[in-house]
Image: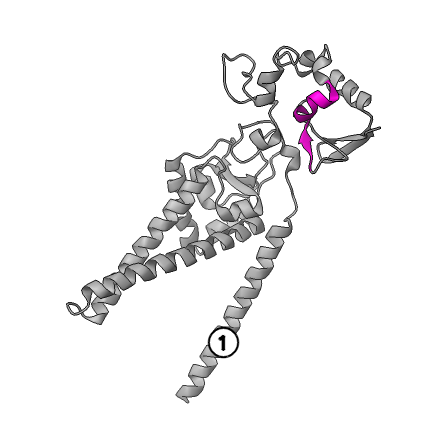
Amino acid sequence: MTEWYYADGQDRQGPLMVEELRQRFQRGEISLTTLVWREGYAQWKALSEAVEELQLQNLTSAASNLGSGFDLRGDYTAIDNGTAPLPGTAGGTYSPYTAPGATASYGSAVVSGGEVVYAGFWKRVAAYLVDYILLTVTSAIIGGVIGGVMGFAMAGGSSASAIESAAQGVGMLLGIIIGVAYYASFHSSRGGATLGKMVVGIKVVRSDGERLTLLRAIGRYFAAFLSGLILCIGYLMAAFTDRKQTLHDMICDTVVVDRWAFTEQSHLQRHELGTATIVILVLGGLLTVGMLVLAVAMIGIFASSMS
């Protein structure tokens, strides 16, 4: 007989026989959004994906179990493809019955009332390191190309110092433009996360879980300068405030949370740092130490040459 398991918050329940699982569904102990697993599954799936296998569509009390007004037997096709309307509405494409891959990822509808795991200081540092390296490399490549073009165009008509000053000015402006485009576009996207935040598994949202608008994301980028201007105290506030907010988070009414926060799968949130975060922090620490050692060595060589 096939043994089934289901997720109850952070706990795994089971093993259960098929009939036991059906009975729990009828009693309302689990719903179609509950994650289930059996031998043969590569990963956990929403119960909605096993409706036919478990013959849940034949349970006469299934619709009342969910309190949703959906009739699984009469509208199974719509539920299966995620087009069934929400209760009390005339339509819509979001359904709580669609599989996690369709609804419980970056950009899913806001679900209030559940636990919210706020991203701590070190997770944010790890995400920043990834984003910083990506932006530095990108800016260096683009800046090098533009600087070369400017040098070639101005050669013969301007002094080397003038060319260097112009290149530096263009480089600074280019860095700001790239930074604004990168952070604002990603933070206002459906996922609310830059590439660095995606790696770590966190996202930026409003304090109520709503997605950022493009204007708010742009404002947050420039507000971050204020956090840095006061000796980076604005950034360090993330280690001490209740909701792990920096100064620019408070100014713009934003929070950085686990990627599963404000979703139907909030039980998947992680309080621990996670492997990706630890690896990034270790590599970042080694890189920092290496740069300090190199700087000290260069200073020693310079001092020796001067004596």
Above or below, 37 against 80 in this view is below
In the picture of the structure, the residue carrying the numbered disc 1 is 296
Q: Position of residue 62 (x, y in %)?
A: 70, 14
Q: Residue 111 vs residue 247: left or right?
A: right
Color scheme of the displayed model: one colour
- In the picture, which quadrant includes the C terminus? bottom left
Instruction: State the image quarter where residue 8 is shown.
Output: top right
Magenta residues, start to end? 43-55
**Residue occupying image coordinates x 51% and y 43%:** 245
Q: Which amino acid type is marked by label 1?
A: Val
Q: Position of residue 138 (x, y in %)?
A: 40, 55
Q: Residue 248 vs residue 9: left or right?
A: left
**Residue occupying image coordinates x 80% and y 23%:** 18
**Residue occupying image coordinates x 40% and y 42%:** 184
**Of 56 and 121, the residue lying toward us:** 56
Instruction: State the image quarter where residue 137 is shown.
Output: bottom left
